[in-house]
């Protein structure tokens, strides 16, 4: 890796190189633009806000190594992407869960005890699921394609973290290391092999890709989002990072077997994909979460940092939850939600935020205390401007208890409230 020059100077240099190379607007098939040195730069696309594209190109020139193999083991810079609503529009974990419920592919607990599906399920949720899904046979797929009461209870627990009678479904978790509903999605894949789940995820993928934008689908007795799209701009970014020698990886809070199916279309091999993992019993998945840092944690806020530190940089034990020295941190990160804020903060060069009005993330991005944050509207159906300021000074930080508190900068000062300005 070369020594780092000021990015502001490199933006101007990158822009000049682009002009000299004649890299004007191009079609999607011409997206692999090159500089005079022959290194790929980002396609000129109106979806990029302000100077975001120029700044990313400047980072590529500064940090990248054109034509290198892109392996962290060989010293390549690392680029990390969240998946849902970052690389694609909408949520593939949702899409697969909805498909499995619609098609009767979610298995009942093997011993009939719903409390074994998650250590965080409340007694109220266990009772509600036991009652609603009483017709299910232990260990067998539940008839949620026809048993709408069971389907609706599953959906309520997963999508709202509540029972249908508005009782809390989960409790007793560290809200910066576990999102129990996301974890439960992966845990409810228990009883299937990874090859079987690959078939389910691919079927869900085909349905959601082929459905028209804005489509809804009937799941249980309600309507849920029924479409997903890859962002062309993010596909181009992934490919451009690889061409410039980056080791590009996914870090997602969706189930890992599901993310692998979707990520393959962007050229990610299984070893480059990190998601929520559960332990195997032989070839069959169980509901037991694979720990991180010596404790129960999934790729969620601090849990994303933990998984990256363990798997990419070889940091083990409780230290995996701590920010590492720059040689053991990614150069670039991209995300859209509060779940991404910690791994994005770790990125040493640039941090790309897709604006979905998530308070902690947007407070950090708009405060931009070190000048390395980029904010971009969603590439499909961008959100309107949030009218009220983000309440960073009072509710900008998610505490482990789940309560909201003031957001602090690394120096201890409080981040002031921020106006939404990129939409």
Image: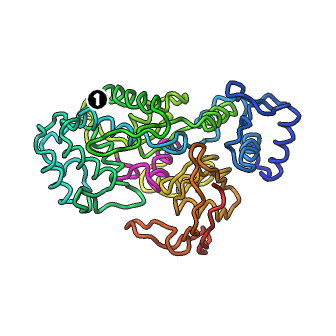
Q: Please give left or right for residue 22 compared with residue 360 in the image.
A: right
Q: Position of residue 228 (x, y in %)?
A: 47, 37
Q: Is residue 1 visible?
A: no
Residue at 23%, 43% in the rendered image = 151
Q: Please give left or right for residue 295 compared with residue 42 in the image.
A: left
Q: Position of residue 125 (x, y in %)?
A: 21, 56
Which of 308/254 is in front?
254
State the residue lying farthest toward the right.
20
Which of 128/183 is in front?
128
Q: Which residue is mark 1?
A: 193
Residue at 19%, 34% in the rendered image = 141
In what quadrant of the picture does the C terminus appear?
bottom right
How dense is the environment of label 1, judged by Cα within 10 Å: few (below 14), some, or many (20 and up)?
some
Q: Position of residue 63 (x, y in %)?
A: 72, 42
Which span is picked out in magenta?
Answer: 291-314
Q: Is residue 379 visible?
A: yes
């Amino acid at each position: 890796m070369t020594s780092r020059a000021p990015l502001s100077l490199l933006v101007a240099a990158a822009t000049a190189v682009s002009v000299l190379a004649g890299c004007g607007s191009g079609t999607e098939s011409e997206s692999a633009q090159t500089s005079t040195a022959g290194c790929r730069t980002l396609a000129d696309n109106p979806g990029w806000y302000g100077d975001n594209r120029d700044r990313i190109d400047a980072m590529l020139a500064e940090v990248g190594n054109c034509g290198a193999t892109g392996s962290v083991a060989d010293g390549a810079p690392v680029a990390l992407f969240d998946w849902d609503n970052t690389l694609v529009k909408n949520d593939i974990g949702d899409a697969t869960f909805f498909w499995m419920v619609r098609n009767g592919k979610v298995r009942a607990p093997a011993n009939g005890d719903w409390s074994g599906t998650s250590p965080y399920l409340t007694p109220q949720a266990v009772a509600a699921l036991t009652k609603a899904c009483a017709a299910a046979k232990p260990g067998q797929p539940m008839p949620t394609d026809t048993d709408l009461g069971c389907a609706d209870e599953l959906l309520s627990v997963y999508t709202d973290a509540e029972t249908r009678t508005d009782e809390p479904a989960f409790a007793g978790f560290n809200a910066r290391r576990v999102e129990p509903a996301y974890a439960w999605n992966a845990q409810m894949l228990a009883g299937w092999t990874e090859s079987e789940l690959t078939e389910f995820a691919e079927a869900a993928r085909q349905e959601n890709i082929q459905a028209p934008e804005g489509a809804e689908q009937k799941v249980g007795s309600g309507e849920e989002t029924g479409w997903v799209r890859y962002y062309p701009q993010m596909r181009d970014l992934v490919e451009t990072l690889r061409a410039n020698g980056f080791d590009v990886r996914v870090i997602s809070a969706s189930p890992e077997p599901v993310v692998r199916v979707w990520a393959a279309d962007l050229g990610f091999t299984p070893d480059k994909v990190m998601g929520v993992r559960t332990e195997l019993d032989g070839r069959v998945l169980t509901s037991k979460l694979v720990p991180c840092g010596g404790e129960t944690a999934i790729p969620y806020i601090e849990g994303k940092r933990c998984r990256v530190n363990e798997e990419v940089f070889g940091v083990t034990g409780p230290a995996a939850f701590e920010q590492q020295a720059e040689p053991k941190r990614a150069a670039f990160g991209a995300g859209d939600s509060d779940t991404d804020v910690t791994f994005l903060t770790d990125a040493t060069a640039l941090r790309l935020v897709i604006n979905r009005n998530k308070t902690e993330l947007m407070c950090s991005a708009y405060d931009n205390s070190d000048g390395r944050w980029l904010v971009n509207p969603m590439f499909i159906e961008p959100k309107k401007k949030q009218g009220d300021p983000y309440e960073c000074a009072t509710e900008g930080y998610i505490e482990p208890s789940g309560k909201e508190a003031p957001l602090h900068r690394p120096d201890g000062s409080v981040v002031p409230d921020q106006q939404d300005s990129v939409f």
